[in-house]
């Protein structure tokens, strides 16, 4: 639960951001308050958390639509739609302080966490100490956090959250979370303390284990820590949640400075009914630079096949120059969009490994050499004695990629030895073996050795090699798609994930413009607006409000001439 009381905080000397926190929830009244505050403003559910029930309003014309959306999401998430309106700072950082208080009047700050790297107003990366924070401001923000806790006679673990203005160096009280938060392991890493143990001590009436001075000494000695939240979501499609069976899950090895808090194991299903977080990866280093390097190395060891995850995106964050330099703000992802979302085409060796994986996996399962058998033909896959052609397509992360297939030809010249053609690239005398127990494909090319984790799910292939993930699929020839009854969805707007349709904003026969809202869906407690991919005319509304849809289901169809 989020505790907020502007009057109490002001009385305690805690700076508060300008805003309306009153009980009058009439939309016109709230809009007038927004005008008094000055745009842009932030709408936020009073009982909110995790970015749910929160919307930024940049101009008056957007106010009512954004208010309705925020209220709807708040009702679905918290059963309450009471909203507050605050001034939105355009270059903010999100800095929070972990506080602890006992029954004896003791209250300490266990350092601050910078949680500025966010999407959908939800944190992705959290770190401590906050980069480039002047020591006098650091001490001041700790003091104000303790004052906030003492003002309400708080006991136990709490987090006092502040908005820090990069332009002015000012900070403002935002809210107090009366619990341990998802990112509390970062604080544990930089203090060496078990905060759950502290909670038990305080609950039993005991005194806090450390003084403020002792805590500050611990933080100086232990360097820096960073946490990455690993989600089942697609960053390339505005971070929409994903769901499904975890076909394969391999994690970095936990050590004293690499910690994994996970709620899933291989074989579990990530449901569309809950938050899409799979795990938290927390690392510690003597410096911030060392911690970032350790985080990147650990992420490169992570392997998740099944739902799409944000792991590849997190790797890009670890090498983003401004992040490495500590120049962060909550709008970082939007401002560095081109840098973070530029796709990289797979190298020819990736396609070669995928083809070898298909062939050698079949050999392993059949306990025989399929190259010596009779000719076999299947979708995207033809075998005539010792020669095999496989056509593969990269699965575009944003769902808008080129569907042109890449042909790969395998010619077996000896047991475990192949000549391979990938497009116009040729590799001779390639030696490759597959270990089914670990799904590991080891291949010696003339110029390099590659070790690849190869996972197949029907026509979809997932490969992990050299610290990167690749997603491919077998090309389905048009004749086969027609024979199998695969529907042409070229003109359809599809559900990007399992979802419930909340609202349909268009009618059949209506002319729409690119990016115009079509349908509002809900999945994993988050609302998502599905927008028109191009100008056109709506030929058919396939699903209405209240319908439950699987991922890939057509929501609306455009008229044929707009193909």
Image (spheres, rainbow, N blue to C red):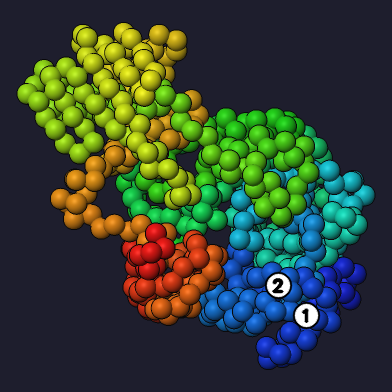
Asked whether 177 or 378 is in front, the reply is: 378
Where residue 241 sits: x, y (%)?
A: 47, 57
Pointer 1 residue: 34
- Residue farthest toward the right in the current orientation of the protein: 136
Q: Quadrant of residue 389?
A: top left
Pointer 2 residue: 57
Give the Cα distance between marks 1 and 2. 9 Å
- Is residue 299 positioned above or below 388 on the image? below
79 relative to 462 in the view: left or right: right
157 relative to 232 in the view: left or right: right
- Name the secondary structure under disc 2: strand
> In this orientation, does residue 189 appear?
no
The residue positioned 62% from the left and 42% from the top of the image is 340
Contact between marks 1 and 2 (CB within 8 A): the answer is yes
Where residue 288 sits: x, y (%)?
A: 73, 35
The residue positioned 62% from the left and 31% from the top of the image is 294
């Amino acid at each position: 639960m989020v505790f907020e009381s502007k009057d109490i905080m002001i009385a305690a000397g805690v700076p508060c951001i300008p805003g309306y926190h009153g009980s009058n929830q009439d939309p016109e009244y709230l809009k007038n308050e927004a005008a008094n505050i000055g745009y842009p403003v932030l709408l936020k559910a009073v009982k909110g958390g995790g970015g749910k029930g929160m919307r930024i309003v940049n101009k008056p014309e957007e106010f009512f639509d954004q208010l309705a959306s925020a209220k709807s999401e708040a009702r679905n998430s918290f059963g309450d739609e009471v909203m507050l309106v605050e001034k939105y700072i355009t270059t903010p950082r999100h800095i929070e302080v972990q506080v602890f208080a006992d029954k004896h009047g003791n209250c300490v700050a266990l350092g601050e966490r910078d949680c500025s790297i966010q999407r959908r107003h939800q944190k992705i990366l959290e770190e401590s100490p906050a980069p480039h924070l002047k020591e006098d401001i650091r001490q001041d923000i700790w003091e104000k956090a303790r004052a906030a806790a003492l003002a309400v006679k708080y006991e136990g673990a709490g987090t006092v959250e502040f908005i820090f203005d990069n332009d002015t160096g000012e900070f403002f009280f935002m809210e107090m979370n009366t619990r341990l938060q998802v990112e509390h392991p970062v604080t544990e890493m930089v203090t060496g303390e078990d905060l759950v143990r502290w909670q038990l001590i305080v609950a039993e009436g005991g005194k806090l284990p450390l003084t403020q001075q002792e805590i500050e000494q611990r933080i100086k000695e232990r360097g820096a820590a960073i946490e990455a939240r690993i989600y089942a979501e697609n960053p390339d499609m505005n971070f929409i949640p994903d769901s499904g069976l975890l076909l394969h899950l391999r994690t970095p090895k936990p050590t004293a400075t690499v910690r994994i808090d996970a709620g899933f194991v291989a074989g579990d299903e990530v449901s569309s009914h809950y938050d899409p977080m799979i795990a938290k990866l927390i690392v510690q280093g003597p410096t911030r630079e060392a911690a970032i390097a350790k985080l990147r190395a650990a992420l490169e060891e992570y392997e998740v096949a099944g739902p799409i995850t944000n792991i590849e995106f997190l790797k890009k964050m670890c090498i983003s120059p401004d992040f490495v330099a500590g120049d962060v703000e909550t709008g970082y992802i939007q401002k560095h969009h081109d840098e973070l979302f530029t796709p990289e085409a797979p190298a020819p060796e990736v396609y070669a490994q995928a083809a070898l994986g298909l062939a050698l996996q079949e050999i392993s399962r059949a306990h025989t050499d399929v190259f010596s058998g009779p000719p076999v033909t299947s979708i995207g896959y033809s075998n005539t004695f010792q020669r095999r052609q496989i056509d593969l397509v990269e699965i575009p992360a944003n769902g808008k990629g080129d569907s042109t297939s890449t042909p790969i030809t395998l010619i077996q010249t000896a047991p475990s030895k192949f000549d391979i053609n990938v497009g116009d690239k040729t590799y001779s005398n390639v030696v490759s073996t597959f270990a089914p127990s670990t799904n590991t494909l080891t291949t010696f090319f003339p110029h390099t050795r590659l070790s690849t984790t190869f996972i197949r799910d029907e026509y979809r292939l997932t490969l992990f090699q050299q610290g990167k993930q690749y997603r491919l699929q077998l090309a389905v020839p048009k004749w086969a798609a027609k024979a199998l009854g695969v529907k042409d969805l070229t003109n359809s707007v599809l559900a990007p994930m399992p979802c419930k349709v909340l609202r349909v904003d268009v009618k059949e026969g209506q002319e729409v413009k690119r990016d115009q809202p079509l349908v509002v869906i809900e999945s994993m407690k988050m609302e998502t607006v599905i927008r028109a991919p191009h100008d056109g005319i709506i030929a058919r509304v396939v699903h209405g409000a209240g319908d439950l849809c699987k991922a890939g289901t057509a929501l609306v169809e455009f008229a044929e001439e707009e193909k």
